[in-house]
Amino acid sequence: MEHPYLLPLTVVLLGFLSQSFTKLTPRVSFPTGIPGRPLTRFSGHDVSNTTTLLLSENGDMLYVGSRNAVLALDVSHKDTIVLRSKLDWSPSEKDIEQCSMKGKKMADCPNFIRVLQFLNTTHIYACGTFAFSPRCTYINSETLTMSLKADEGRGRCPYDPYQRNTAIIVDGELYTGTVADYRGNRPVISRHLGEGRRLDLKLDDTLGWLEEPTFISSSFIPDEEKIYLFFSEVGREYDFIDKFIVSRVAQICMSDVGGQRTLQRRWTTFAKAQLLCQVDSELPYNVIQDIDTLPPAEGAPADDTLFYGLFTSQWSVNSGRSAVCSFRLTDIKSVFSGNYKVLNRDTLQWSTRVQEKIANPGECGLHNASDNALRFVKENFLADESVRPVGRRLTLLSSEHDYSHLTVQRVQAANSRDYTVLFLLTESGYLHKAVLLQSGAHIIEEVQVFEQPQLVKSLKLSIPTGMIYIGTSEGVVRVPTANCSFYWTCPQCVLARDPFCGWDPVSRACVEASKTRTGLCQDIDRGNVKEACNTVSMTHRDRFGPNKLPAGSDAAFQTHQLKVIHIFL
Ligand SMILES: *[C@@H]1O[C@H](CO)[C@@H](O)[C@H](O)[C@H]1NC(C)=O
Ligand SMILES: *[C@@H]1O[C@H](CO)[C@@H](O)[C@H](O)[C@H]1NC(C)=O
Ligand SMILES: *[C@@H]1O[C@H](CO)[C@@H](O)[C@H](O)[C@H]1NC(C)=O
Ligand SMILES: *[C@@H]1O[C@H](CO)[C@@H](O)[C@H](O)[C@H]1NC(C)=O
């Protein structure tokens, strides 16, 4: 039962099937402990509830925000992760007493670190929930010591450790999306740390600019001098009996300093729009879970920046499914420069009535604008159009896997073409590596990261070092983005269709494509072994041994795919 050459045919055939027919089965599965994909774990040292991860630029240090502590981990060693230093940052007994007197569970009263960002070359800015009384501090990144200067955390960090937030520091200023009160019902997007250079700003909260949001992420786009924030919230523009959740992208300009009379100390550049992860008339995948930014390829304009978002659905017909959609910056910009919906203040109904444009909502540099213009942007903040995904289709739809986190990377293959690779974490503890092809997504492999499902709050990719870090309730796990040497033969190497890996006929080894550019055998799009390996003579042993593929191996994969062919031929 050997059909090594039938595979390219099956791949081509599968390309004709509609998206919902494609089963996203990883080609190779690595259970924990298997030598092909060894993991490096860091746990113990009283580390729990890892919530935030921050990588140094060269990828040698990993800063970890966890329960009552910030850690500096030396991740520059191949086989181990070494604790460099640890900063304890716990509430006092009195703080905890007060927290529990307010009726909070003891387990929720520690300090959960929720903001961890580089402030400048010497300091990190950190904020934690601190017994439901959030605080922020400055930490020396070299010595991991806290400076005496401390800030109140209100508006920068949630009170409640179960509430999600987002934070990003750009040019020494902190932009955050969080709830700003103890009861958790005053959401705000704000800017801090102007340090006298300029005023802190926040959202005007009289008009419902945000509706019970769950903040997911924020991204700084240098060319635009804008911050984009991603979240889900209740879509009040829809007349639904149930609360209808919508996913959003919002924007603010870094140059914003608020208005002079109208919108004093408030954003004049805030605008939001719906992000639609939906095909035609099907139910949308409306709840954003995670999103990552893919900067444009070298030499391409900033407008080609892509955002890869992971979505689930609010409706039970789609429960257990997840979808990935990608959005192009240029599409987001064109939605923000279009028309805006209008809220009737008496009926609280939104309409799309086209009105005379007194100002352009979302435009940067409105600080000297007239009161009239500022009143207009204050009321017109919800873009009329929705942002549609690239190609008006889902990038990936999985009915078997409940993905919770994703990260994305562009990888140059041996043929110099760029491929997009997604790393997706499943709720059940597997990391999937998928390459996006014309014919759909191909899941190269899955690596089991945990045996028991774990609460994951953070997934970080270090492109310079080729490592992925996963922060869990028990510590940190490191997974290399690829292990090409696991593939023993040219056919195995080519069939993997992994843009990271190519077969080097000289050294007769499957090697990292980025390290050996020339003369590699690789065929990401078709996995055509016959063509790609034609210079290499193949023996039976070359094809199949001695490395036995684990579960989901070639043979199983091919039989599975062959069955599909019989049905559709
Ligand atoms: C890669 O796989 C090989 C073969 O299974 C194994 O011996 C090696 O330790 C792995 N290397 C890494 C860095 O994962
Ligand atoms: C902290 O971790 C524990 C154990 O995994 C978990 O039960 C708890 O919900 C976590 N707390 C928060 C605030 O995430
Ligand atoms: C970084 O910020 C901290 C805190 O404001 C300050 O003490 C330090 O001098 C700054 N470092 C540099 C290099 O600007
Ligand atoms: C706005 O007005 C202030 C004075 O009111 C002035 O200093 C500033 O240059 C003006 N800014 C712009 C962009 O016109």
Image (spheres, rainbow, N blue to C red):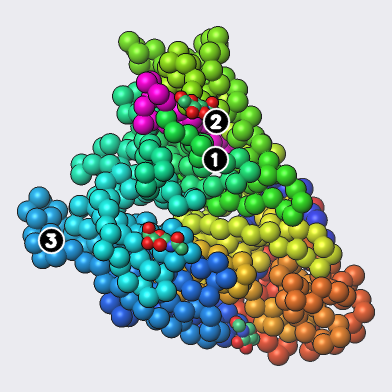
Q: Which circle, 3 or 2, is nearer the viewer?
A: 2
Residue at image point 27% right, 53% down: 151
Query: Quarter-wise, where is residue 461 in the image?
Result: bottom right
| Amino acid at dot 2 | Cys
In this rendered view, identify the residue nearer to me: 353 or 532: 353
Disc 1: which residue: 226
- Counting other residues with Cα less than 10 Å from the Cα at mark 3, is it few (<14), some (14-19), or many (20 or more)? many
| Amino acid at dot 1 | Lys
Query: Quarter-wise, where is residue 96 in the image?
Result: bottom left
Number of marks drawn: 3
Disc 2: which residue: 364
Left or right position of 194 against 20: left
Q: Is residue 338 above or below residue 158?
A: above
Residue 128, position in %: x, y?
29, 58
Residue 251, position in %: x, y?
51, 36
**Residue 394 in sight:** no
Residue 217, position in %: x, y?
46, 48
Q: Is mark 2 within 8 Å of ligand 4?
A: no
User: Residues at badges 2 and 1 in contact (C-beta under 8 Å)?
Assistant: yes
Q: Between marks 3 and 2, how big is the CA–CA gap?
A: 44 Å
Magenta stretch mostly in which secondary structure?
Answer: loop
Task: Tell me which label, 3 or 1, sits earlier in the chain.
Answer: 3
Disc 3: which residue: 96
Q: Mark 2: which secondary structure? A: loop
Q: Between marks 3 and 1, how big is the CA–CA gap?
A: 39 Å
Q: Which circle, 3 or 1, is nearer the viewer?
A: 1
| Span shown in magenta | 259-280
- Counting other residues with Cα less than 10 Å from the Cα at mark 2, is it few (<14), some (14-19), or many (20 or more)? some
Residue at image point 73% right, 84% down: 488
Residue at image point 34% right, 61% down: 138
- Counting other residues with Cα less than 10 Å from the Cα at mark 1, is it few (<14), some (14-19), or many (20 or more)? some
